[in-house]
Image: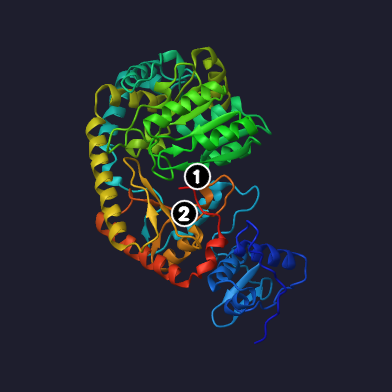
Amino acid sequence: MHWTALDIRADRQRREPLYRQIVAHLREEIRGGRLPPGTRLPPTRILARQLGVTRLTVVNAYAELEADGLVTSHVGRGTFVAGTDGETPVARTWPPSATPGRPATELLDEFFRMARGPGVIAIHSPTALRELVPVKELQRAMAAVLRREGAEAVGYDAPGGYAPLREWLGEHLSEIGIRAAADSIVITAGTQQAIDLVTKLLVQPGDVVFTDSPTYVVVIDLLEARGARIIGVPMDAEGARLDIMETLIVRYRPRLFFTMPTFHNPTGITMSLERRRRLVTLARRHQLPVLEDDVHRDLWFTPPPPPLRALDRHGVVLYASGLTKSLLLGGLRLGFLVVPPEVKRQFVTAKQAADLHTNSLIQRVMDTLLRQGRLERPMVRLRQALQARRDRMVDALEREMPEGIRWTVPEGGYHLWLSLPPGISGVALYRAAIQHGVAVAPGMPFFPDREDRGHARLTFAVESPAAIDQGVRRLATAARQLLRARRPDDSRDLRRPVI
C-alpha cells in the first residue's frame, strides 16, 4: 500500500522539540485540507529516516495526532488521516498534547484515564491506603456531635468558620511557630478553596504570578482562570531558585508567589531552612505576597523546617493548609487560611459569596476529633506506612533503574520525582510504562508552560510494598527500552531540566 510523501523540515536549532515540530506541521496540513481524510502517512521508520530523527520521535508525533482525533492507526495497515469509515479514535488514543487554554488538571486526568486497566500497577496518584482511613473514629465523633448539638450541628454557621475549631487551630499553629489568633483564621472547604480565595482577592487579569516550576496542577488552572500570566521559578534540591527568582522579580514585578515548600507536589522536595529565611527576606524587600501551601506538613518521616509563615514578621506570607487530606479524609473538604487580621473581613466576604460557609457538621466533628486526640494514632500509623513504602520504592529504584535516571528522596508526603536522561520525555516514559503494565504521571502537566522537560512523578502511597517492587521493575524495563531507541544527538530534542 502506498503512502503520501511529506515535505517536513525538522529544525534542531529551535527550542521546540522535534516531535512537536512534526505535530504542528501535520496538524496544519490536515486542518488546511492539504492532507484529506483517508490519506496514508509514511511509516514511522521511513519518516524518521527522511527527517534524520529517531523512530521514537515520529511515534510520539503520530500518537499525539491520534489523540487529537486527526489520524487513526491500524496494526498492519498504517496511519491514516481520520474521517474515513466513520471512525473516531477515542478509546485507543493516547492523552493529547498540551494546547493553549487546556486545563492542566484536565490533561493530567486524561493521562490517568488511560492508565486504568486490568493488571496495571498504579504508582501515579495517591488514592489508596483505604485500610488506614480512621472510619471508626469518624463515626464516634459524628455520633457524639449529633447527640450533643442536635439540629444546631447541621444549621447555618459563621462564614469565617466554627469558632472553637479556629481557637484550636490558633493554639496548634503556635507549636510550629505560627502566631495566629482565631480572628486571623478562615475555615475553608479544603486547601484548594483557601488558595482560590487568595487568587480571587489578589490577582487580576494580566497580573504576573510566580509559582514553583513544576507546581501543583490545580494552581495552574486557578491562576489561568483569573487571566494571570504564570512564570515558573525553577527548583533545585533545596527548593525554588532564589537567585533566578530575584532577577525575574525585577523584570516582571509579580503580584504573588505560590509555593509548597514542605513535601512539594510533585517533586517531594523540602525547602531548606536557610532558603526559607532568604525567601521571606526577599519577599519583604520586594513587597511580594507569598502564598504558602503546607497541606502535607503532618505527613513527615523527618520533621521539616518551620513554615515560611513562622519566619515572617512582616505579614508577607499567607498560610494555607488542610485538616482532612493528611488523614486520607480529603473528601470531607476541610482546610483553613491564615491571613493578617486587618484583611480577614475581605476573605470572609469572599468566602461567604462563594458558598456561605463550610459544612457545619464536619467542622464540629473535626473539632471533636482534634480536641480528644483521636487522630494521633491514625496519623502515626499513616506516617509509618508511607515511610515503609517510600523506602521500598527508593530501594527498588536503586536496584532496577538504568544509569542516567535520577530521583528525589522525600522526607514526607506521597511523591517522588524522576529526572530522565536527555532525549527521553516524560510522556514517552508514560507510554512505554503503560505498555509494560505500570502507570506513572508524566511531568508535563505540572509545568506552567506544559513543556515536557523529561520528568515523571511516582507515588508510593497507593500500592503494597510487593506491588511497588514489581511496578518499579516494569518501569525500569520501559526505561531501558527507551534508552536503547535513543540516538546520541537526541539530547537536542528537549530543554533539559533544572532539577
Q: Nearer the viewer, residue 152 or 190?
A: 190
Residue type highlighted by circle 2:
His
N-term mark: 2 or 1: 1
> Is the residue under label 1 in contact with that under label 2 (CB below 8 Å)?
yes
* Residue identified by numbered label 1: 214
- Residue at the spot 49% in from the left edge and 38% down from the top edge: 241
The CA distance from mark 2 to mark 1 is 10 Å
Residue located beneath label 2 in the image:
455
- Quick one: label 1, few (<14), some, or many (20+) residues within 10 Å? many
Residue 344 position within the rendered picture, expressed as x and y whole percent measured from the top left: 52, 16
Farthest residue, direction bottom: 1
Under tag 2, what secondary structure?
Answer: strand
Colour scheme: rainbow
Q: Using a 10 Å C-alpha cutoff, classify the residue at mark 2 as few (fewer than 14 neighbours), some (14 to 19) or many (20 or more).
A: many
Q: Is residue 307 left or right of residue 383?
A: right
Look at label 1 and name its amino acid.
Answer: Pro
Does 306 sit above or below residue 22?
above
Coordinates of residue 18 in the picture (x, y in percent)? 61, 64
Residue 18 visible in this rendered orientation of the protein: yes
Write the residue at 46% across / 54% down. 455
> Which residue is at 24% across, 30% downward?
376
